[in-house]
Amino acid sequence: MMLKGKKGLSDVVTTVLIILLVLAAVIIVWSFVKPLILGGGETIATTADCIKVDLQPISCVYNVTTDIATVQVKRTGGEVNLKAIKLISQTLGGEIKTSSNTSVLGVLETKTYTYSSSENITQVSVGALLAGDSGKEVGCSESTVKVTCTNI
């Protein structure tokens, strides 16, 4: 035998449980989505900075006696948080090597970088390492300009 009024009470409990489950699901989903949304904004800003930085290799000389490459790099882009310069070199054997230098360029500045390589360097391009808003280092793609190295 069923008592009057008990049916309404079970409907209320069921509704409250459904609301609590939906709130828990929303909180769980938001905990995964929030970092993606916030990180996406920084990625867009950093990508725009990669376009702005505009680094170009000007010349490359490789000394076969000392195994030292001397590369001139010019920066023509706008103001960004440049952390380091990446020198991307191709050796005579076709191997790609990357070297970073924290001596950065100012806007409209040309600088000479030297680094040693035991293999003969044939081509050089450059890239930028930027510091994102969160302090995380972000690498930009290499320049489209590649300079052929001359041997001395």
Image (cartoon, rainbow, N blue to C red):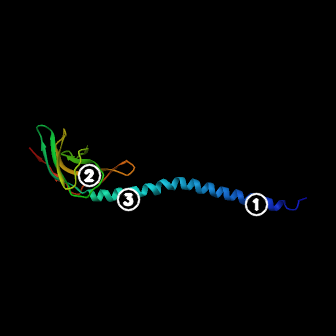
Residue at 33% in and 59% down: 48
Q: Mark 1 near mark 2, Cβ–Cβ under 8 Å?
A: no
In which quadrant of the rendered view does residue 47 lie? bottom left
Nearer to me, 110 or 36: 110
What type is the residue that disc 2 sits on? Gly
Residue 5 in percent (x, y) is at 85, 61
Rendered position, 97 above or below 37: above
Answer yes or no: do the residues labelled 3 and 1 have beta carbons within 8 Å? no
Task: Compute the Cα span from label 3 to label 2.
Answer: 18 Å
Amino acid type, label 3: Ile
Label 1: how many residues lie within 10 Å, few (<14), some (14-19) or many (20+)? few
The image shows residue 70 at horizontal and vertical percentages of 15, 45
Tag 3 residue: 44
SS assignment at label 2? strand
Separation of marks 1 and 2 at Cα, in angstroms: 63 Å
Q: Residue 127 carries which label?
A: 2
Residue 34 in picture, x, y percent from top left: 50, 55
Compared across the picture, whether 51 is left or right of 146 comes to right
Position of the N terminus, as image quadrant, is bottom right
Instruction: Kindly state the secondary structure of the residue where label 3 is placed.
Output: helix
Left or right, 135 with reference to 61: right
Task: Specify the quadrant of the image occupied by residue 145.
Answer: bottom left
The residue indicated by pointer 1 is: 12
Choose the circle earlier in sequence order: 3 or 1.
1
The furthest residue to the left: 152
Q: In this view, does 126 lie above or below 12?
A: above
Closer to the eye: label 3 or 2: 3
Which SS class for mark 1?
helix
**Which amino acid lies under the numbered mark 1 shown in the image of this protein?**
Val
